[in-house]
Image (cartoon, rainbow, N blue to C red):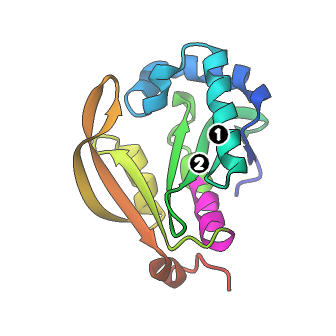
Amino acid sequence: MHSRLTLHLWRENDAEEAFALVQQSRIHLEHWVEWVLQVNTADDLRKLIQYSIERHHAGVTWQYCIRQDGRIVGGVGLVRRSDADGEIGYWLGAAHCGQGIATQCAREVVRFALNAIHLDSIEIRSAVANKRSRAVAERLGFIRTAILPGAHWAASEPQDSVVYRLNRRSARLKGWIVQ
């Protein structure tokens, strides 16, 4: 990963800075990120972070803060859906899109999911209209497997969702898996 980028599990003391980023990027994020509509204060975001910490201790989720040059620019996470399957999601503040950050950070989480947790398949779901998010999945070698009508809920309305998947066999062929 680029030396200016770092990932760490979200901490409660990240809430104020992250909330400022959400506020700066609210119009951008509301179109794509479902939880943004539930976050109206730093305390709301702190509660989501606390929940992600609890779920991490239960071995269900790994939610990371993305920092660039020490400043929070977004988040990336993995949710285990079963013993064998997981889903990755990511978000960035509007000013940080288009720089390859989401791709680099999602790549690290995919490697973690395959090599440390040993998942057999990983999904990325995105609104069909979110071309940048879809491009991340495609750059990482995920294959589009389905369109789910009305399955993505953001901006207070349902949107069609596209599902991308990477399975263990494909990941091995791409050199993602460390033997």
Which of the marked residues, 2 or 1, is nearer the chain's N terminus? 1
**Which residue is located at x 39 percent, y 50 percent?**
125
| Along the viewing direction, whichever of 95 and 64 lies nearer the viewer | 64
On the question of residue 29 being in view, the answer is yes
Name the front one of labels 2 and 1.
1
Residues rendered magenta in the picture = 106-116
On the question of residue 73 being in view, the answer is no
What's the residue type where badge 2 is placed?
Gly
**Which residue is located at x 43 percent, y 20 percent?**
27
Please state the horizontal and vertical placement of residue 139, each as a whole percent of the image.
45, 61
Residue 136 - label? none
**Which residue is located at x 45 percent, y 79 percent?**
170
Q: Predominant secondary structure in magenta?
A: helix
Crowding at dot 2, Cα within 10 Å, few <14 / some 14-19 / many 20+, comes out as many
What's the residue type where badge 1 is placed?
Ser
Q: CA distance from mark 2 to mark 1?
A: 10 Å
Please state the horizontal and vertical placement of residue 44, each as a whole percent of the image.
61, 19
Mark 2 touching mark 1, by CB under 8 A? Answer: yes
Residue at which label 1 appears: 52
Residue at which label 2 appears: 77
**Which residue is located at x 40 percent, y 34 percent?**
32
Q: Farthest residue toward the top?
A: 41
Query: In the image, is residue 111 part of the stretch drawn in magenta?
Result: yes
